[in-house]
Amino acid sequence: MHAEVVRRSPAEPEFHQAAREVLETLAPVLAARPELADAALVERLCEPERQILFRVPWQDDAGAVRVNRGFRVEFNSALGPYKGGLRFHPSVNLGIVKFLGFEQIFKNALTGLGIGGGKGGSDFDPRGRSDAEVMRFCQSFMTELYRHIGDRTDVPAGDIGVGGREIGYMFGQYRRITNRWEAGVLTGKGPGWGGSAGRTEATGYGNVLFAAEMLRRRGEDLPGQQAVVSGSGNVAIYTIEKLHALGARALTVSDSGGYVRDEKGIDLELLKQVKEVERGRVQDYAQRRGSSAVFVPGGSVWEVPGDLALPSATQNELDVVDALNLIRGGVKAVSEGANMPTTPQAVRTFQDAGVAFGPGKAANAGGVAVSALEMRQNSGREAWPQDRVEAELATVMRDIHDTCYETAERYGVPGDYVAGANIAGFERVADAMLAQGLV
Ligand code: NDP
Ligand code: 2IT
């Protein structure tokens, strides 16, 4: 099957990687349940239901015309409307959007909240762009995207380069074009206009809760643990906030320019000021932090030893050399805040060394889970308090952890959260597809 994926979609290495990582874990379930193999469910799952590519023209502040490409891959809607983020980053191409959309199918199934899988974005680079430029880009992007989405059809949200500011501009344009107050068409909105309390924090908080569950199974807990965190965006910031709230300490942050090691633990208030308010770089954080922090330009954050590793930047940011470094440094658990940050060889290296390894499609599902709760609030025209959302998030993350753990045991691969997540997500989608016939 993997050869067929490669033949049909050449030059999409990230999609091939994501598909291979799932396909190679499904043998036990396909052997146990031949009806799933007979219905060609794996083949059908590997082909998106719909892929949309479009031109995004916009004008920069100097008046020059710019052209970007927009993407939305509507991968699978057996369990609910397509759901998944939008990524704005110069590296975005169809293969990257397809890898993300493919992962999203299984992740969303694991939440149990009735959402299908999709992903989108653009090769637009927001870095260094003014607010006005970002707004014009978002408006142009939505001027095409609006006809493909809807609260019962496809519900985008944020990802790399897309946060509250961009969701606001896109929601405004959607509302203007359609003349509808359709709050549930996008998630990650501001709390004053249909957004859920706790959505901003959800991915990072959820990942720490997942890591805590993995530690608990090993007879350990979070307080006192030292964590190595990569990235310095939405996921990294709220990972650090939750680590500190639960008595652990985050030692690092990073961006594409290098990493910061802070012996006293990351100062969250300063990090938020630099990243969320000023849209600055981790180097600026180090300069203002004082003697406890050093900036290492161009270095790999995984040189820093810690009890936990929480990759929260981007795909394939942690390779086998990094894995061996972390293992030498005594790492006990790795929990993926980002999507597919660990290369396949590095995943195997951790597993062979007995390190608990939580794959992104389980560990970072808290973000999309709270997005689904936002959709639920929007349908009922409700606004839940933060403590209710956080309590539901904690329940969802515990359930996902236990589902992965128990599924791995049931299929004879105990402790393998990768296989557990893939098989459990696959079974939920496959059973729905089987029941709904050949569509
Ligand atoms: P942000 O845009 O807020 O932050 C991204 C961070 O990752 C930045 O520090 C950025 O550094 C770094 N980064 C991005 N691309 C690269 C690259 N090619 N090389 C090195 N560093 C890079 O994004 P998020 O925090 O939202 O997303 C981070 C990861 O989490 C992604 O993998 C995303 O798919 C995943 N995720 C996000 C969810 C969400 O709710 N936002 C939910 C689930 C998963 P720089 O500024 O230098 O580019
Ligand atoms: O990768 C992801 O799960 C996200 N970027 C969040 C998707 C969402 O719809 O909230």
Image (spheres, rainbow, N blue to C red):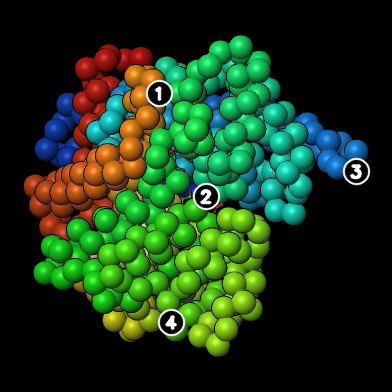
In this view of the protein, which residue sits in the foreground, 14 or 328?
Answer: 328
Q: Residue at x 45, y 55 (%)?
A: 235
Residue kind at label 4, given as amino acid type: Lys
Mark 1: which amino acid?
Asn
**Residue 153 versus residue 34: which sits nearer the camera?**
153
Work out whether 413 lies above or below 251.
above
Crowdedness of circle 3 by 10 Å Cα count: few (<14), some, many (20+)?
few
Which residue reaches farthest right? Answer: 63
Give percent across and percent down for residue 121. Answer: 59, 38
Residue 238: x and y, percent? 42, 57
Work out how far the residue at label 3 is from the one at label 2, CA to CA, in angstroms.
36 Å
The numbered mark, 1 or 4, whose residue comes first in the sequence reads: 4
Give the residue at mark 4.
Answer: 264
What is the number of the mark on residue 13?
A: 2
Disc 4 on helix, strand or loop? loop
Mark 3 lies on a secondary structure that is loop
Cα separation between marks 2 and 4: 40 Å
Q: Is mark 2 within 8 Å of ligand 1?
A: no
Tell me how far mark 1 sits from mark 4, CA to CA.
Answer: 42 Å
